[in-house]
Amino acid sequence: MITATDLEVRAGVRTLLTAPGPALRIQSGDRIGLVGRNGAGKTTTLRILAGEGEPYAGSVVRTSDLGYLPQDPKEGDLDVLARDRVLSARGLDTLLHKMEKQQALMAEVADEARLDKAVRKYGELEDTFSSLGGYAAESEAARISNSLGLPDRILGQPLRTLSGGQRRRVELARILFSASDGSGGRSDTTLLLDEPTNHLDADSITWLRGFLQNHEGGLIVISHDVELLGDVVNRVWFLDAVRGEADIYNMNWKKYIDARATDEQRRRRERANAEKKAGALRVQAAKMGAKATKAVAAQNMAKRADKLMANLDAERVSDKVAHIRFPEPAPCGKTPLMAKNLTKMYGSLEIFAGVDLAIDRGSRVVVLGLNGAGKTTLLRILAGTERSDSGQIEPGHGLRIGYFAQEHDTLDDRASVWENIRHAAPDTGEQELRSLLGAFMFTGPQLEQPAGTLSGGEKTRLALAGLVSSAANVLLLDEPTNNLDPISREQVLDALRSYKGAVVLVTHDPGAAEALSPERVILLPDGTEDHWSQEYLELIQLA
């Protein structure tokens, strides 16, 4: 269980949330959808509830085990095997390694005393292993991993050799394994999941819904997957970015949608009635105030009018919308970007080999492949942030690349919003940059906020803002719609439709592919090229 009392959440000097009393409380059986527009404070609030950050005011008490999945998990040792990372949720990885060591020792020693000692030690380790679930638990970890698109082949690889999407799925598998006792997710562990469906295919999302529906502990989930919210949540916390408050709805998603619309209508109706009454009182008070004998009555009327208005909820205004656009491309030759015979290996593992491609001026290309096929790696090589093992990049006349990384690798988490945009566009004037940031909804004190404290959606907007002033004529976009609310997503799709330069796109979002109207696809790991067709759109929908 988690209880937040008198919670106040701030980002710099900006107040994101004020929740007086024990309003925010998560108990076993609560499956809470934490919703609100990008920048409302969802990710920051979840981080504080998980104990990864401190509130500006108030306290958070945690009385159960937690499983926290951040948007951008930062793993420790990348040389650890994916299987060991999952098993580490219950300490099984260390025990298995110790048992293997004792087995090797028992096979090697000839001395009876040393052999007896090794056998006793192995027995103790095996007893501890059994108490934690033993081989059944190991099988459960493998089942969860496979359900999330992590087969045995992937589990046997070091984290370093996995794509960003695969590593995030390893973290999700680890958290779900910690919350499972082999009975389908039934435990007292409180799960705090920030966009858990990112990087999951359709089958994995379906399995995840079933797991979360059966989870008996507490759950808070941030997601833009409306179907997931509709199937899983039984309570909703709406973080209102306008009022800086949390509206609590003890109902499922469908009823919440109806109740939210009713609340907005009620607030508008109450304000209109109160403004009408307050106006009449003030007119009457003005008339009576002219007479000395009725001055006190006039003052009381004016006070009543002020009280009427003060008791209303803050006036509802429309949420700000980012005006996202892509840069006007700089002039370039007919084929600004070519690559020949690109090959990438991680140790003895071949990611792809012999990939050739040519990106013509204004062309639109989608890179497709299963998770782990090397899509992100290919974009990183094209962007120059990673080297291929063989082959070469051949830049054409006037090439200017703009790269958007799905893991927001182009941002410096320790630098402020302003420092990041200044680094991205060092030759652009200060006022022009401030106007640019304003269009992407970064204003005032938020400019001094460290990029590492931004939500995933805010990081996406900041990274996209960095592209605008680049005059790039080839955009390399890796999952540009991840973490975005529906309004911001539509802005990105509109920007894709209107951009005149070349685009190489990696996406799991069918809407992004449709907005791009691609001419070609590149299929990894083979590097095969083909003309775009609706069949490939169906492939994206299934992937």
Image (cartoon, grey):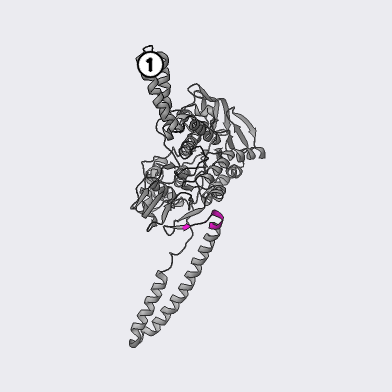
Quadrant of the image occupied by residue 121: top left
At 61% from the left edge and 39% from the top edge, which residue is drawn?
A: 542
Q: Quadrant of residue 143?
A: top right
Task: Judge by depth and name the residue closer to the eye, 291 or 442.
Answer: 291
Q: Is residue 75 found left or right of 343 in the rendered image? A: left
Secondary structure beneath disc 1?
helix
Q: Which quarter of the picture shows residue 242?
A: bottom left
**Which residue is most to the top?**
110
Q: Is residue 473 visible?
A: no
Which residue is pictured at 51% across the width and 66% down the height?
A: 266
The image shows residue 160, relative to residue 59, as above or below, that is above
State whether residue 17 appears in this view: yes
Magenta stretch encompasses residue 157: no
Q: Position of residue 497 (x, y in %)?
A: 58, 46
Q: Estimate how packed mark 1 is, as few (under 14), some (14 to 19) or many (20 or more) residues with alpha carbons within 10 Å.
A: some
| Span of residues in magenta | 248-256
Residue 368 drawn at (x, y percent): 59, 34
Q: Nearer the viewer, residue 124 or 162?
A: 124
Tell me the residue that label 1 is attached to.
Answer: 115
